[in-house]
Every structure is written in structure tokens, then in C-alpha cells.
């Protein structure tokens, strides 16, 4: 070893010990008679002193040191002089009196320093990710990630789960997002697909008798990105046989309880609360509501129908919805200009046609530019419906149900942050259950799977598969943490006939189903047990338990929102010979149109 100790290890108990340390120069201070540097590695920082006793050659070499140089120092552990102890450092009581210095690698002037206060934009940090990863915050996050994964593995081993690896190169079986395709050199014109999830493999494992499977799985989806989504991601994949949904949820409840206790010191009471999908959409406008605060959505469609306000009346008569939220005590915080900004927000980003508002005045009456279209009696009913008190601000969207959900969900989320309605360190865990089995694609006029095509319907809804698929509810469940989907799972179809019926509803002919999923349909005929599972987004768990806003900060080498790796310039060009071996020709965009 090039070092005897790390830079975060030495304490007063090691005074007078001869040690060798290695690390990066974090800072340096030349005080004339002596030079001081802070030497850093991922364990901490230690102050190193180059004094006249170090020798002229060592001092001269030390004066050439700069930030991020990699060095090795040998010296004796000494107590810091009285009045110079640094309580902010775990090594703050000691320093190393250097007698030997070796420069292992010089660093040219970096584009930014890992310890500087104001960090540059994300693109520059991703371009030089090796510097960014030296930041203490990044190192803490990756250590947290490692700890969470170990806790997960330990927990599932205790529960008698078997860790099984599934293939990365598989068959393209579209499950919603686009596949990443890998051409075969041996089988020209044929492609592997990178797994969107190990979904079918883990179901096959249940049919093979491995009734408790777990895997830390790499997954790939070629889809549009955002702050909490990546083209390649990691999930904890779980599957269980001879269980119902409550068994799967119960296992994850135990994991949540342990993780919250060990990482946050929180005592989580089990079982975690559950809410149906329909209730979540009515009360919060979203299937992953943030329950750290109230401000629930209120329906006022029946009252709107009684108003002379043309917009409300037309929406109600068309069978659409008039819904809103009450921002308690916010009337004085939002001027007319700020309300106009909120109106643009819900209109431009979420398709709402406008935003109506009322302020509850000191006398208890509702005031608004549209108040003249309401009788005093009707205004009193609106006030009662929204539980308004003096100082409250009521914000209302009148539109299709889906639009009111999207607009008010986003508005609720924005106002909660601006009004500081919750403690960012607070955590709330819950389940959303009974999702719709199908969603109707209006453009293509066909049914699509709400989760994936292997999701089991509730037994009582089997009769609706043929008559009214829109009424079917799935045995599906999502874990929600602080308004983010932290995991999702379903019970699976284990009957061949039901699976074929679902494929048919999704527009697959028997021939299509056989071509895409023949191996699954075959396996279902050879003794398939009832089974179900869940996938937990590890990247998102790290983001949520680490109190971060961007999932890219939870991944060592992430992609940008354009799915590019700025450090390695991936994706990149390949040699012509490689394409020829794969029998692939690249067409220009204008050639594609032909």
C-alpha cells in the first residue's frame, strides 16, 4: 500500500506516529515560514505542514503544489498548536509534520474545483465528471447509494429471496417505451434488445419454481427524459409466487420501515396507508400525490352550473369539471401580477383554458373580477365548499377532467413549494392501488395497457374484459414517496386464456402474440403458479432519501436529457468495417423520406 492511513482516519490518539498519506491537494496556504496544505481523499481531510524542519528540498517542492495535485506525504502526527484546532474537521486536532513528499501526478488548471462554492453549469460538470465526482456531496451520495443497495440485498436475503441474474441481450418484446436495439453480427438482419425490465424472465423464474426472486437489475428505455428519468437505470426487481398483492406490499412495507429507520431515524408505522387510483385522482389530480401537506382538490361543478358565469356554466353543461384548490392564507402573498403568472403556468404548460380566482376578504366575502356573475347565496356556497376563511386564495380550473387533474396537480405542487407548506426533510410513504387495467388511445382508437400487458385484472373484473375493458381495474400497486413513484408492481396473469384475451384487446392477433410472446404463452401452459412482483427505482430511492432534486446526481456516469454522455461523447460514430460486419447501412434523413 502507498499509504498507512486515509485522510479521515487520524486522531489525537495517533500523535507521534509515523504515517504515510496519499490524496489530492484540497487547498494550500503559504505563511512564509511554513506551508500548509489540506490533503483530501474520500474519507476526509488532513492538514499537512511543511516547515523548515521538513528540509529545503521538501519545502521547495511543496511550494510548487497546486489544487488537485496527487501527492504522497510521510511524516509524524502532531497536535495542532493551541488555538488552531479545527472543530469542523474530524481530523481537526492533529496535523502531519511532513519530512518526505512525492508528487504522484500534477494537475493542470482544472475548469472548476470540486470544493469551490459556486459550481458551474451541469454540462461542464458532466463533461469533466471525474472532477465532479470528487465533490464531497457527490461522494456522500454514491456512498448512500451503496448503503441502500446493501440494505436491500441484506433484507431480501433474510426473507429467503434468491438473487438471479437475467440476460442483458434478449428479444424485443415492446412493453411501452422504445427498445434499445443491438444488431447481431452472426444473424444478419436480426436484433437483440436491451431489457426495459427483466419482466418476462422473472415470470419464467416463478414458473420454474424459484418462488422468491430478487435482482439489482440494469434496465434500458429509449424514451423522452426529464430530471428524474434516465435512458439506463437501476431497479431492485422482485417477484414472488403463491402470493397475493398484500404479500408483495407487506414485504416492501418491511423494507421501507427498515430503510427509513436506518437512514433517517424515522419510526414508520405499518402497514403503510393505501389509496385507490380513483380517490387519488379526485383528491390530488395525480396517481403519485405528495401527502406531506393538504391543499386537496375540491369539486365545484354542481355549483358552477348554477352561476351566470358563461365559462363555468358551459363546462358544467358539457359534462366536464370545475375544480380548484384553496391556498390557505395566501391571498396577500399573490398579487394580480403573480396570479397572472400562475394563469400562464397552467395554460402554457398544462393546457388549461384559464384560471379563475377568489380572495376571501376580511369581512368573509369572496372577491374576484368574476364575482359579479354569482349571487351572494352562490358565493357563500363556494366559500363553504372550499372551506375558505379571511386571507385565503381560491384557484379554479374549468375543463376536461384530465386537464383539471394535470393543471391543479402542478399548481398544488408549485404553491406548496412557494408557500413552504412542508419540511423538505420530511418523508411520507403510501401506496396507490387499483389502477385502471387499460387506457384508451384516442388518436389510434384502441386500448393500451396502463402498466404492461401481463398485469392481472381483479377477479371481479374478468367479466368486463370482453364487455367493457374501461371498467377493468388491475391488481396493481405503486409505492409513493413524497409525491414520486418510488416503485410499481402488479400481480401477473397466470392463465394462458386470459393472457391471450388481453393481448387481443391490445390489438395483437394470435399470430402477433405468438411471434412476440410465444415462449411466455407456452410456459403458461406448463404449470404456472399465481405470482406477482414489483420493481423499486434505486436511482429514485437514492434521490429521495438523499434529499436531492435531480436523479443525475445519484448516478456516477449519467446521461443528459438528450441521452448523451458528455464525458465520453457517446453515442458516437463507428468504423465502416463494424457496420459492414453487421450488414448495416446508414441512411441520411433525406433518404429516409424516400
Image (spheres, rainbow, N blue to C red):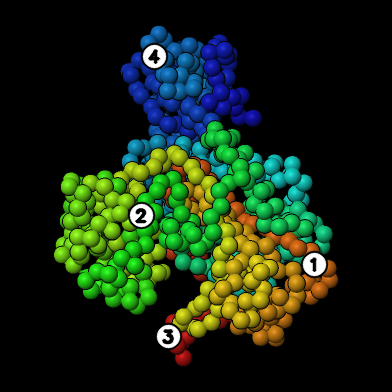
Mark nearer the viewer, 1 or 3: 1
Q: How crowded is mark 3: few (under 14 residues within 10 Å), some or many (20 or more)?
A: few
Mark nearer the viewer, 4 or 2: 2
**Name of the residue lying farthest toward the bottom:** 594
- Say which element carries label 3: helix
**Name of the residue lying farthest toward the top:** 82
State the image quarter where residue 283 is shown.
Answer: bottom left
Mark with earlier residue (4, 2): 4
Q: Is residue 170 left or right of residue 547?
A: right
Mark with earlier residue (1, 3): 1
Marks 3 and 4: CB-CB under 8 Å? no
The numbered disc on residue 590 is 3
Mark with earlier residue (1, 2): 2
Give residue 117's position: percent from left, percent from top.
Answer: 34, 37
Mark 2 lies on residue: 412
Q: Residues within 10 Å of mark 1 (few under 14, many from 20)?
A: some
Residue 141 visible = yes
Mark 1 lies on residue: 528
Amino acid at each position: 500500500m502507498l499509504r498507512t492511513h486515509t485522510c479521515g482516519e487520524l486522531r489525537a490518539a495517533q500523535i507521534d506516529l509515523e504515517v504515510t498519506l496519499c490524496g489530492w491537494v484540497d487547498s494550500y496556504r503559504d505563511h512564509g515560514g511554513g506551508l500548509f496544505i489540506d490533503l483530501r481523499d474520500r474519507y476526509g481531510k488532513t492538514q499537512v505542514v511543511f516547515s523548515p524542519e521538513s528540509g529545503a528540498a521538501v519545502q521547495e517542492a511543496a511550494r510548487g503544489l497546486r489544487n488537485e495535485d496527487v501527492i504522497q506525504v510521510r511524516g509524524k502526527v502532531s497536535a495542532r498548536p493551541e488555538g488552531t484546532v479545527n472543530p469542523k474537521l474530524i481530523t481537526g486536532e492533529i496535523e502531519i509534520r511532513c519530512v518526505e513528499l512525492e508528487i504522484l501526478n500534477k494537475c493542470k488548471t482544472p475548469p472548476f474545483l470540486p470544493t469551490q462554492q459556486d459550481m458551474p453549469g451541469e454540462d461542464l460538470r458532466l463533461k469533466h465528471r471525474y472532477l465532479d465526482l470528487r465533490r464531497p456531496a457527490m461522494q456522500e451520495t454514491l456512498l448512500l447509494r451503496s448503503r441502500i443497495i446493501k440494505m436491500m440485498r441484506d433484507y431480501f436475503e433474510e426473507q429467503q429471496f434468491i438473487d438471479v441474474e437475467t440476460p442483458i441481450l434478449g428479444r424485443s418484446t415492446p412493453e411501452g417505451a422504445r427498445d434499445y436495439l443491438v444488431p447481431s453480427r452472426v444473424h444478419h438482419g436480426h436484433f437483440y434488445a436491451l431489457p426495459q425490465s427483466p419482466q418476462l424472465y422473472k415470470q419464467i423464474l416463478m414458473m420454474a419454481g424459484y418462488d422468491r426472486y430478487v435482482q439489482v437489475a440494469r434496465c434500458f428505455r429509449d424514451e423522452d427524459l426529464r430530471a428524474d428519468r434516465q435512458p439506463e437505470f437501476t431497479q431492485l426487481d422482485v417477484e414472488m409466487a403463491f402470493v397475493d398483492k398484500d404479500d408483495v406490499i407487506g414485504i416492501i412495507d418491511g423494507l421501507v420501515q427498515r430503510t427509513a429507520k436506518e437512514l433517517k431515524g424515522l419510526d414508520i408505522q405499518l402497514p403503510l396507508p393505501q389509496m385507490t387510483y380513483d380517490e387519488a385522482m379526485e383528491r390530488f389530480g395525480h396517481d403519485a400525490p405528495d401527502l406531506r401537506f393538504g391543499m386537496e382538490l375540491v369539486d365545484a361543478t354542481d355549483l358552477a352550473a348554477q352561476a351566470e358565469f358563461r365559462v363555468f356554466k358551459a363546462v358544467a353543461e358539457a359534462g366536464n369539471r370545475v375544480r380548484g384548490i384553496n391556498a390557505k392564507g395566501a391571498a396577500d402573498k399573490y398579487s394580480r401580477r403573480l396570479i397572472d403568472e400562475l394563469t400562464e403556468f397552467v395554460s402554457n404548460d398544462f393546457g388549461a383554458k384559464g384560471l379563475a380566482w377568489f380572495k376571501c376578504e376580511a369581512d368573509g366575502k369572496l372577491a374576484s373580477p368574476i364575482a359579479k356573475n354569482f349571487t351572494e347565496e352562490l358565493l357563500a356556497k363556494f366559500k363553504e365548499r372550499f372551506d375558505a376563511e379571511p386571507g385565503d386564495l381560491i384557484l379554479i380550473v374549468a375543463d376536461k377532467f384530465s386537464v383539471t387533474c394535470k393543471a391543479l396537480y402542478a399548481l398544488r405542487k408549485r404553491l406548496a413549494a412557494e408557500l413552504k407548506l412542508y419540511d423538505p426533510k420530511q418523508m411520507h410513504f403510501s401506496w396507490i392501488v387499483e389502477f385502471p387495467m387499460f387506457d384508451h388511445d384516442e388518436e389510434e382508437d384502441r386500448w393500451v395497457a396502463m402498466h404492461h400487458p401481463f398485469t392481472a385484472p381483479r377477479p371481479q373484473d374478468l367479466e368486463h374484459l370482453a364487455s367493457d375493458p374501461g371498467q377493468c381495474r388491475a391488481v396493481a400497486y405503486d409505492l409513493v414517496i413524497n409525491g414520486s413513484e418510488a416503485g410499481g408492481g402488479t400481480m401477473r396473469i397466470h392463465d394462458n386464456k386470459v393472457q391471450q384475451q388481453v393481448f387481443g384487446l391490445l390489438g395483437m392477433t394470435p399470430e402477433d402474440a405468438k411471434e412476440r410472446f410465444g415462449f411466455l404463452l407456452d410456459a403458461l401452459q406448463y404449470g404456472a403458479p399465481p405470482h406477482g412482483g414489483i420493481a423499486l427505482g434505486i436511482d429514485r430511492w437514492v434521490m429521495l432519501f438523499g434529499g436531492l432534486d435531480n436523479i443525475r446526481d445519484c448516478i456516477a456516469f449519467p446521461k443528459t436529457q438528450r441521452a448523451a454522455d458528455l464525458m465520453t461523447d457517446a453515442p458516437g460514430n463507428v468504423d465502416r468495417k463494424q457496420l459492414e460486419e453487421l450488414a448495416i447501412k446508414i441512411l441520411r434523413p433525406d433518404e429516409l423520406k424516400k
